[in-house]
Image (cartoon, helix red, strand yellow):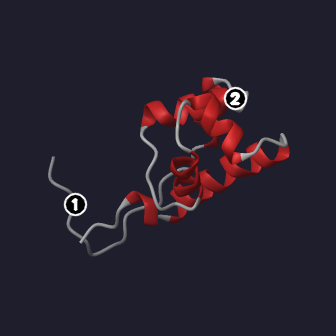
Amino acid sequence: MKRKTIYQAEYRKLVKQLRDVREGLGITQASLAAELGWPQQKLSAIEAAARRLDVFEYFALGGRLGLSREQALAMIPEPAAPRRGRKPAKA
């Protein structure tokens, strides 16, 4: 069974980087969430890797943190290579 993205190390690393940027700027979850029009609980769940960010949310969040789209893209880690012995996903 394929693991959901939120449980993958690469996703958790990305979320940690976003949280580190937010904290480095001295921005609280509550103030950032308010700027985004989100409940604070949504941002908390994202940072705890309990809720997955979609691509639009990712760029909105990155933009509010002062990241250009290029910087936001550069933060995304390379996906891990598939494990051997597993069948490839169907297209």
Q: Is residue 36 above or below residue 51?
A: above
Circles 2 and 1 in contact, beta carbons < 8 Å: no
Q: Give neighbour class at mark 1: few <14, some 14-19, many 20+ (Cα, 10 Å).
A: few
Q: Earlier in the sequence, mark 2 or mark 1?
A: 2
- Callout 2: SS: loop
Q: Give neighbour class at mark 2: few <14, some 14-19, many 20+ (Cα, 10 Å).
A: some
Question: Label 2 to label 1, Cα distance in Å?
Answer: 35 Å
Q: Nearer the viewer, residue 13 or 18?
A: 18
Q: Residue furthest bottom?
A: 85
Residue 22 position, x and y percent, is 75, 44
* Identity, as a three-letter code, of the amino acid under mark 2: Leu
Residue 31 position, x and y percent, is 70, 38
Residue 57 position, x and y percent, is 48, 35
Q: Disc 2 designates what residue?
A: 67
Which residue is rendered at x = 75% and y = 51% of the image? 20
* Identity, as a three-letter code, of the amino acid under mark 1: Pro
Residue 64 position, x and y percent, is 67, 28
Q: Nearer the viewer, residue 23 or 2?
A: 23
Q: Is residue 32 left or right of residue 79?
A: right
- Callout 1: SS: loop
Number of numbered discs on residues? 2
Q: Is residue 55 left or right of residue 36?
A: left
Which residue is rendered at x = 45% and y = 55% of the image? 51
Q: Disc 1 designates what residue?
A: 88
The N terminus is located in which quarter? bottom left
Q: Residue furthest left?
A: 90
Which residue is rendered at x = 84% and y = 43% of the image? 26
Q: Is residue 11 left or right of residue 15?
A: left
Which residue is rendered at x = 48% and y = 54% of the image? 79
Q: Is residue 9 above or below residue 30?
A: below
